Image (cartoon, helix red, strand yellow):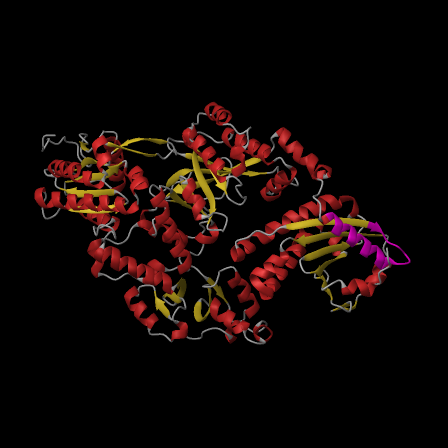
């Protein structure tokens, strides 16, 4: 091999960088501490070790996104390599260099004698760590994951030509990058096999809260490696298992551990188990074995949700879908994880039709401030309802995020705001009533105050450097804000997009980074008292200069800072107030919705006024929707709405109310005497008129052939309506009404065809029986 001089090595490098000890070498081996003689250092060393990382598809990224984006990619990768090197190599890297050799190629060079004996393990761990550090940013900006090939080498330094030793080691590492690492030779392999053999994984549980009750729907089981071991991090544990070819075996251990250590579940509660999509196709993954373990611990398949992440491709989707149907027939449920991150395509979700859609935290956090996130979430809620799924929002960490999710109709939530993952599984119950409730309809003449909309933000002193504020805002997103205050009195505001515009100008970073935040803040932000009505504040906000139209509003109480309100949150709250309260209409039927219903219930309960509740729900409606389409399904819902209004006009009174509470669910508030007459009228009309929405063949047969929720074809009755009647005759509460209404609804749906049932138990809030007002 020809000898290479140090200058030839320099020509092969775009940049040598060692941020660890402040030396930056660039085409002349110059650092901020003066010349750095690499040859002299090598000559003084006995051995040199090198770890090489090559980014796959680097040229494809350039082709797709251009050189400007590639510069950002390079900075992210270089920082990730640097951070990973320090985390995993510590003292060894302190004596070495982190280098950018050429586009998409990075190296760690060290002359530490302690490194050569552990190069294989360090190289493997480094690749996993770098990929995990880069994954969130890459997915957010490209929707793609980043692939990294690795190689390594270690050589004794030639005293005569020390630089040639480095070149030879580099060439050896490049050759290795073209082949897979032999994981069987890893020291980590022995430790990993021991974990599998002794089943020494740890399991913690994080609750998933049901927003309708404030109690857990269930718990997600999360696996960890043994404490203080190399595999304590779940990322390294599962990435190693996949590389080692033992992912299915590891998941089996985790699955058994999660089931065996989960204390008993209440009726209807679920245990969420994470599985790789290919696990379902593994011949050793049998429902019989899982069911046996479940029975040993008092659980049924109905208690288990297989949570599938689409981070890995599904090569044969048709086989995967048939396998899902197989496990569904056993009684298991399905959830799709990471929805909203780029992993989960809507087409595949629509094909799978999971029971639950888990929305990734990147879409959930900050939803109250980001109109794009809000629109996406609202779309996903509608989409989920159309395909018979329910939404679980992950990563909820603030009360404002929770309030926004509740207002959008999200069904369930999970996050540190409720509980961190713990063992044993945490039992929690949260009263969400105040967060869900909108002021009663009687209060429409009164204006909302800003206090109800306040959210926390960061407050800094006037002397805070701009660079520090920039770091704070990097964690907040494009609509973030920081209040500048002196003694808790606001003196200015700076918005993320204003700061970015200033720093993006020529010499902006050099000009402002070390200056105080006062040099860029808005010295005249909109500051309002917490008692100010939102209509008044909205008018003040719209009268501002157009460049400040979307700046946050600072809210104070007695001059002291409470927080901020974003313009988007203010607009959303006003829209909710005006549309839901003043109009209160469901967009499909034009009938009032949940807000007016809850207000009317509270008003009647406060007056101790006896009344009846009729709960109406369509039977076999999902099957009809799937076969005839959503448009025809909407027409049946509109038909039921018209029939209910007709029945109220004919048999009700002026104080009766019908509300469309979502989907195919309706509720009527009526007098005790009229409830059964109204119900009988609804059933008679619906039986007759719904026939026209079926084909002549289906009408004649009296049933339809369609695919059920389990994916199997079957024969289903025509759409019918089930009505359940319960009576309130005294003081009670919304919780008691909701629980009894659910019981009556369940019983009414157990009857065949269109029918109504009456709850003949003692009316809520009374100790006296009631007479029958209408013969069945």
Task: Please say whether residue 448 is visible from this viewpoint.
Answer: yes
Q: Relative to 514, does residue 254 appear above or below in the rendering?
A: above
Q: Relative to 509, does residue 123 appear above or below in the rendering?
A: above
Point out the residue furthest to the right here: 160
Q: Does the magenta stretch include residue 733?
A: no
Along the horizontal axis of the image, is 102 left or right of 561?
A: right
Q: Residue 188's image quarter?
A: top right
Quarter of the picture holding the C terminus: top left
Along the horizontal axis of the image, is 57 left or right of 472?
A: right
Residue 614: image location, x then y, percent: 19, 39
Q: Which residue is painted at 44% across and 37% down in the image?
A: 334
Quarter of the picture holding the N terminus: bottom right
Along the horizontal axis of the image, is 609 left or right of 302?
A: left
- Pick whichever, 497 or 762, lies toward us: 497
Along the horizontal axis of the image, is 165 left or right of 770?
A: right
Task: Please say whether residue 431 is visible from this viewpoint.
Answer: no
Q: Is residue 163 magenta?
A: yes
Q: Which residue is painted at 24% across and 41% down in the image?
A: 733
Residue 192: image location, x then y, percent: 66, 35
Q: Which residue is painted at 56% across and 55% down in the image?
A: 138
Q: Residue 217's image quarter?
A: top left
Q: Relative to 54, does residue 639 appear above or below in the rendering?
A: above
Residue 157: image location, x then y, percent: 86, 53
Q: Give the range drawn in magenta.
A: 155-176
Q: Residue 617's image quarter?
A: top left
Report how many numbered discs are placed on residues in the image. 0
Residue 672: image location, x then y, percent: 12, 38
Q: Relative to 583, does residue 766 appear above or below in the rendering?
A: above
Helix, strand or loop: magenta stretch: helix
């Amino acid at each position: 091999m020809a000898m290479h001089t140090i200058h030839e090595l320099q020509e092969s490098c775009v940049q040598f960088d060692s941020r660890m000890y402040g030396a930056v070498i660039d085409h002349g081996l110059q650092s901020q501490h003066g010349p750095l003689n690499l040859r002299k250092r090598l000559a003084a060393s006995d051995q040199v070790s090198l770890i090489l990382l090559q980014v796959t598809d680097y040229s494809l990224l350039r082709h797709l996104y251009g050189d400007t984006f590639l510069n950002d990619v390079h900075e992210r990768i270089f920082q990730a390599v640097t951070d990973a090197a320090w985390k995993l190599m510590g003292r060894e890297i302190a004596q070495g260099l982190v280098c950018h050799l050429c586009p998409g190629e990075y190296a760690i060079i060290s002359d530490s004698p302690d490194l050569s004996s552990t190069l294989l393990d360090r190289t493997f761990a480094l690749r996993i760590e770098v990929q995990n550090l880069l994954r969130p940013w890459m997915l957010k900006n490209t929707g793609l994951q980043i692939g990294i090939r690795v190689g390594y080498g270690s050589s004794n330094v030639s005293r005569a030509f020390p630089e040639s030793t480095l070149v030879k080691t580099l060439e050896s590492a490049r050759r290795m990058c073209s082949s897979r690492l032999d994981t069987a030779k890893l020291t980590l392999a022995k430790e990993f096999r021991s974990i599998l053999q002794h089943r020494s994984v740890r399991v913690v549980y994080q609750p998933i809260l049901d927003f309708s009750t404030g109690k857990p729907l269930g718990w997600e089981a999360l696996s960890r490696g043994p404490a203080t071991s190399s595999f304590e991090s779940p990322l390294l544990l599962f990435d190693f298992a996949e590389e080692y070819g033992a992912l299915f075996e590891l998941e089996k251990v985790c699955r058994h551990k999660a089931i065996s250590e989960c204390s008993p579940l209440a009726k209807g509660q679920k245990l969420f188990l994470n599985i790789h999509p290919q696990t379902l196709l593994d011949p050793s993954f049998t429902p019989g074995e899982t069911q046996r373990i479940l029975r040993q611990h008092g659980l049924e398949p109905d208690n288990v949700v297989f949570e599938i992440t689409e981070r890995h491709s599904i090569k044969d989707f048709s086989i995967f879908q048939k396998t899902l149907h197989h496990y569904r027939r056993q009684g298991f449920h399905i959830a799709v994880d990471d929805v909203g991150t780029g992993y989960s395509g809507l087409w595949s979700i629509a094909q799978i039709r999971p029971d639950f859609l888990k929305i990734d935290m990147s879409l959930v956090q900050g939803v109250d401030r980001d109109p794009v996130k809000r629109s996406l979430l609202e779309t996903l809620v509608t989409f989920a309802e159309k395909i018979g799924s329910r939404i679980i929002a992950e990563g909820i960490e603030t009360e404002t995020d929770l309030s926004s999710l509740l207002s959008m109709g999200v069904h369930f939530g999970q996050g540190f705001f409720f509980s961190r993952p713990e063992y044993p599984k945490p039992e929690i119950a949260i009263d969400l009533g105040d967060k869900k409730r909108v002021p009663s309809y009687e209060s429409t003449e009164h204006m909302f105050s800003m206090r109800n909309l306040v959210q926390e933000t960061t407050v800094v002193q006037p002397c805070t450097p701009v660079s520090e504020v920039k770091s704070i805002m990097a964690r907040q997103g494009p609509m973030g804000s920081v209040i500048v205050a002196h003694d808790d009195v606001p003196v200015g505001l700076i918005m993320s997009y204003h700061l970015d515009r200033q720093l993006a100008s020529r010499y902006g970073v050099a000009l402002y980074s070390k200056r105080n935040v006062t040099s860029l803040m808005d010295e005249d932000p909109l500051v309002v008292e917490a008692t100010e009505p939102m209509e008044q504040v909205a008018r003040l906000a719209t009268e501002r200069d157009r460049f400040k139209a979307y700046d946050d509003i600072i809210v104070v109480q007695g001059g002291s800072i409470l927080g901020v309100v974003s313009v988007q949150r203010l607009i959303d709250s006003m829209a909710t107030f005006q549309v839901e309260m003043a109009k209160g209409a469901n967009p499909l039927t034009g009938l009032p919705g949940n807000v007016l219903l809850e207000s009317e219930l509270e008003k009647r309960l406060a007056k101790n006024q006896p009344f009846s509740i009729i709960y109406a729900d369509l039977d076999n409606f999902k099957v009809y929707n799937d076969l005839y389409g959503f448009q025809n399904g909407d027409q049946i819902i509109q038909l039921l709405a018209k029939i209910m209004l007709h029945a109220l006009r004919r048999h009700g009174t002026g104080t009766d109310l019908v509300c469309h509470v979502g989907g195919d669910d309706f509720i009527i508030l009526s007098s005790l005497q009229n409830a059964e007459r109204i119900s009988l009228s609804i059933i008679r009309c619906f039986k007759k008129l719904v026939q026209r929405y079926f084909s002549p063949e289906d009408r004649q047969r009296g049933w339809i052939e369609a695919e059920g929720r389990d994916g199997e074809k079957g024969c289903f009755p025509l759409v019918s309506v089930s009505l359940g009647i319960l009576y309130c005759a005294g003081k009670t509460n919304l919780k008691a009404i909701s629980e009894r209404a659910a019981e009556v609804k369940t019983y009414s749906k157990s009857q065949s065809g269109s029918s109504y049932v009456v709850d003949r138990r003692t009316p809520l809030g009374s100790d006296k029986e009631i007479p029958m007002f209408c013969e069945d």
